[in-house]
Image (tube, rainbow, N blue to C red):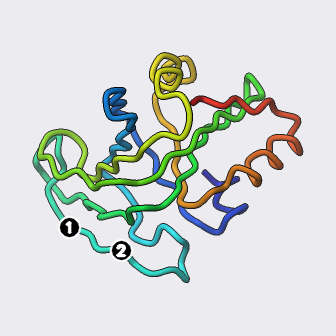
């Protein structure tokens, strides 16, 4: 997260995936998300304060993330010297009481079946950033001497 935040001046959104191959979508879900996806100088998006989903205690933010935007999702694997990478265009904020509070649906750019069938090979979480950040990700992978693995 730190590498990409320093590179882009934008916060990342860590998530657990729900992959819907029938809609060519991935739903990035988590109980914590920013309300300024374009950085501290960008516009704030709305949010709701709700209970935490799993224990129904405390507070969690349901961030209503901007739609119609390209996102870039990455994971850096230090042991394998790889950067995992895929992109998707945001299409919906899912309002479902089950599971995580913030749920962002996005249409995957590329092969949804490849994404679905290989997701668990690198662990569960990924970090999503707003913007078409393919070139910066390619550059940082090259500078680090890491292989870029296109997930979709």
Q: Nearer the viewer, mark 2 or mark 1?
A: 2
Total number of numbered discs in the rendering: 2
Q: Is residue 75 left or right of residue 90?
A: right
Q: Residues within 10 Å of mark 2 (few under 14, many from 20)?
A: some
* Residue 148, image quadrant: top right
Mark 1 surroundings within 10 Å by alpha-carbon count, few (fewer than 14), some (14 through 19), many (20 or more): few
Residue 18 vertical placement versus 133 (above, below): above
The residue lying at 47 percent from left, 51 percent from top is: 89
Position of 4 with respect to 110 (left or right) is right
- Residue at 33 percent across and 46 percent down: it is 30
Q: Relative to residue 49, is residue 145 drawn left or right?
A: right
Image disc number at residue 3: none
In the image, taking residue 122 as reference, residue 18 lies left or right, namely left
Image height of 107 relative to 24, above or below: below
**How far across and down, in percent of the image, does residue 27 sit?**
35, 41
- SS category of the residue bearing label 1: strand
Residue 113 locus on image (x, y percent)? 47, 21
Disc 2 to disc 1, C-alpha distance = 10 Å
Residue in the image at 80% along x and 48% along y: 140
Question: Viewer-proximal residue, 81 or 38?
Answer: 38
Residue 45 disc label: 2
Q: Position of residue 29 (x, y in %)?
A: 33, 44
Secondary structure beneath label 2: loop
Q: Are marks 2 and 1 in contact (CB under 8 Å)?
A: no
Q: Quick one: 12 or 92, which is closer to the camera? A: 92
Residue at the image position 10 percent from the left and 47 percent from the top: 56
Q: Quadrant of residue 121?
A: top right
* Nearest the eye: 23 or 52: 23
Which quadrant holds the C terminus?
Answer: top right
Which label is found at residue 48?
A: 1
């Amino acid at each position: 997260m730190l590498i990409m935040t320093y590179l882009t001046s934008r916060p990342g959104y860590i998530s657990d995936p729900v992959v819907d191959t029938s809609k060519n979508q991935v739903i990035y879900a988590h109980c914590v998300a920013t309300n300024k996806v374009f950085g501290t100088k960008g516009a704030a998006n709305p949010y709701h304060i709700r209970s935490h989903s799993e224990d129904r205690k405390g507070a969690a933010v349901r961030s209503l993330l901007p739609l119609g935007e390209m996102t870039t999702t990455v994971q850096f694997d230090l042991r394998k010297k790889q950067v995992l990478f895929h992109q998707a265009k945001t299409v919906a904020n899912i309002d479902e009481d089950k599971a995580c509070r913030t749920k962002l649906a996005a249409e995957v750019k590329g092969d949804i079946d490849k994404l679905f069938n290989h997701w668990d090979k690198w662990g569960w979480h990924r970090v999503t950033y707003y913007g078409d950040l393919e070139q910066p990700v390619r550059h940082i992978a090259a500078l680090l001497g890491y292989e870029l693995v296109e997930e979709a």
